[in-house]
Amino acid sequence: MTISIDAPAETTAARESRVVLDPGHGEAFTEHMISMDWTEGEGWSAPEITPLRNLSIHPGMIGLHYGQVAFEGLKAHRRADGAMGVWRSGDHALRFQRSCRRLAMPELPAEAFVAAIDQLIDADEGSLSTDPSHSIYIRPMMFGTDTSLMLRPSRSYRFLLMAFVAGGFFGEDVESVSVLVSHEYSRAFPGGTGNVKVAGNYAPSFLAQREAEAAGCQQVVWLDALEGRYLEEMGGMNMFLVRGRGADAEVVTPQLTGTLLPGITRDTMLTLARRLGYRTGEERISLEQWRAECASGTISEVFACGTAAVVTPVGRVHDRDGDWTIGDGTPGEVTMALRKGLTDLHHGVADDPNGWLHACTRS
């Protein structure tokens, strides 16, 4: 499939006039979007770049009624040399394919996914300031477009790519967050869709998140659905625990069981931790074990990671059987070392032997 998108010509001054200085998270959309359509008979259409605009859809669209919607989330960062780089876009392309495959949707070729992102960033990088805490969050998505209420997969689909300028997910400062352990609700079930990014995974989590906020917490900790004992994710992020301190620390994360999302940042953290000299592990960790190891001081730090949250320290846990503090409740040494290692990679100021930071190029 040959990708060719001509973005509108634009002067440097015009781009600079669109810089977003106080983006928040999720609402400072950039000016363009890219769309492609797929049908059974013709496959993928040529990509089209247009101004960001509302969609016109039939109220009987299959994707709207039956949740045939998959998406991704990744970021572009301004490197220290001023150029733009997209973080692990090829890996996100492959995960997007897995999500679409799980919902019986067509797979967008990885090269088309990466090329479309390059073109959108080329068109909209002028919205990004030089503040290193800001980035462009990119949202690829695909949904079924057939007009039918028959319970079946759609026979036509639309791929959309849009973006927004992002600040910090929990604010601009790096502070520890508090979390609520959810015992009443489950995020994902064996054989379900917990290991892919589909729209239906997220709305059911909103009620638990609302309860967390009512309890004075920023996020929810999910337990496994079968026994309600084992740590899985934190909100929409992967969790990590740090045992010990300093050079002898061990960085561990819940084992992938088919109900957790295999996060791109999760994979990065495991690799980066080993590169920094820490031992790493993937385990089934029970809530009781977590509480006991924090009480004994064995677990000294906890953090969550993800595209939006980057690396976010956790300082306090609220649970029906009693609350507890992790370490002294402040961001830990290992957490902050990993966060710095990740952000240095994002901005191209650290060695990148894996080639994770993809330099944006026009087709």
Image: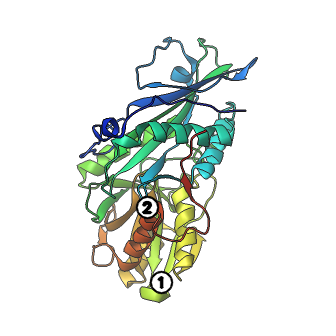
Figure quadrant of residue 163:
top left
x, y percentage for residue 162? 46, 34
**Horizontal side, residue 95 vs residue 244: left or right:** right
Residue displayed at 36% across by 79% down = 333
Q: Is residue 154 visible?
A: no
x, y percentage for residue 28? 31, 38
Q: Residues within 10 Å of mark 1 (few under 14, many from 20)?
A: many
**Horizontal side, residue 213 vs residue 270: left or right:** left
Tell which of 302 and 128 is nearer to you: 128
Q: Residues within 10 Å of mark 2 (few under 14, many from 20)?
A: many
Residue 249, disc: 1
Tell which of 290 and 6 is nearer to you: 6
Residue 147, disc: none
State whether residue 189 is above or below residue 234.
above
Residue displayed at 62% across by 52% down = 91
Number of numbered labels in the structure image? 2
Tell which of 215 and 312 is nearer to you: 312
Q: Which quadrant holds the C terminus?
A: top right
Residue 347, disc: 2
Secondary element type, mark 2: loop
State whether residue 57 is above or below residue 211.
above
- Nearer to us of marks 1 and 2 is 2
Secondary element type, mark 1: loop
Residue displayed at 47% across by 68% down = 240
Q: Amino acid at mark 2?
A: His
Q: Which quadrant holds the N terminus?
A: top right
